[in-house]
Amino acid sequence: MAGAALTPSAIQELVLPLAQRIQGGEYGTVRLVVSTTDPGVKDFVEYMAHVHQLPVYVCQSPLDLGRSIPVGILTHAESGTLDGIFELGGYVTASQLAEAENIKPNAAKNRLVNLDRAGYLMRTQRSRREGDVYFEPRSATAWSALYEPQLTAGSDTGI
């Protein structure tokens, strides 16, 4: 809809049901990114994300998802955790996050689980020994790591 001027009602009608369905898992492992150069639209989407407790990312260009900003209700620690995971390449285990953030492994696991439940991370379950891997959706590296094991099924290599 390049160049279209949408009213707040139209934006809400388009974005809110989609974000709610994504949060409910209706579309599987999908995250919502709204791309806009209009600061008013950005503010309105952020407002909706807060009011409806929805995980949404906002960016200025669909070609630069790495600069998208997670909006919604996030604590300072949660925001910092998302940024830290992004800086670490886009995916981590709880033990890797604990080491990088200098926190206890249980605290790292709790942060990751909570961000996954809230819809800001994606998780791939692995054996207890290996630990689950959590992916931050802004990272192209994370996406390739998430889907490469499916493309190379039968291989012993993984994350």
Image (cartoon, helix red, strand yellow):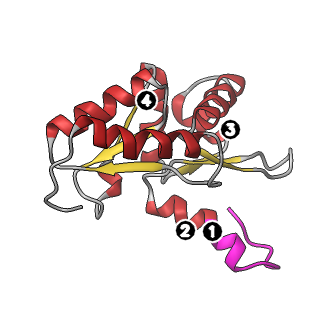
**In what quadrant of the picture does the N terminus appear?**
bottom left
Mark sitting on residue 80: 4
Q: Amino acid at mark 2?
A: Ser
Q: Amino acid at mark 3?
A: Ser
Which residue position holds label 2? 144
Residue sitting at x 54%, y 38%: 20
Q: Position of residue 15 (x, y in %)?
A: 40, 44
In this view, the mark in front (3 or 1): 1
Mark sitting on residue 147: 1
Gap in Å between the C-alphas at discs 3 and 4? 17 Å
Q: Report the magenta residues as a range.
A: 147-159
38 in relation to 1, above or below: above
Residue sitting at x 57%, y 38%: 119
Gap in Å between the C-alphas at discs 4 and 1? 25 Å
**In what quadrant of the picture does the C terminus appear?**
bottom right
Comes first in the chain, label 2 or label 3: 3
> Is the Cβ of the residue at disc 4 closer than 8 Å to that at disc 2?
no
Q: Going by the image, does 140 lie left or right of 154? A: left
Q: Nearer the viewer, residue 64 or 4?
A: 4
Gap in Å between the C-alphas at discs 2 and 3? 21 Å
Residue sitting at x 49%, y 63%: 141
Q: Secondary structure at mark 2?
A: helix
Q: Position of residue 16 (x, y in %)?
A: 44, 38
Q: Amino acid at mark 1?
A: Tyr
Q: Position of residue 101 (x, y in %)?
A: 52, 30
Which residue position holds label 3? 95
Q: Going by the image, does 115 lie left or right of 14? A: right
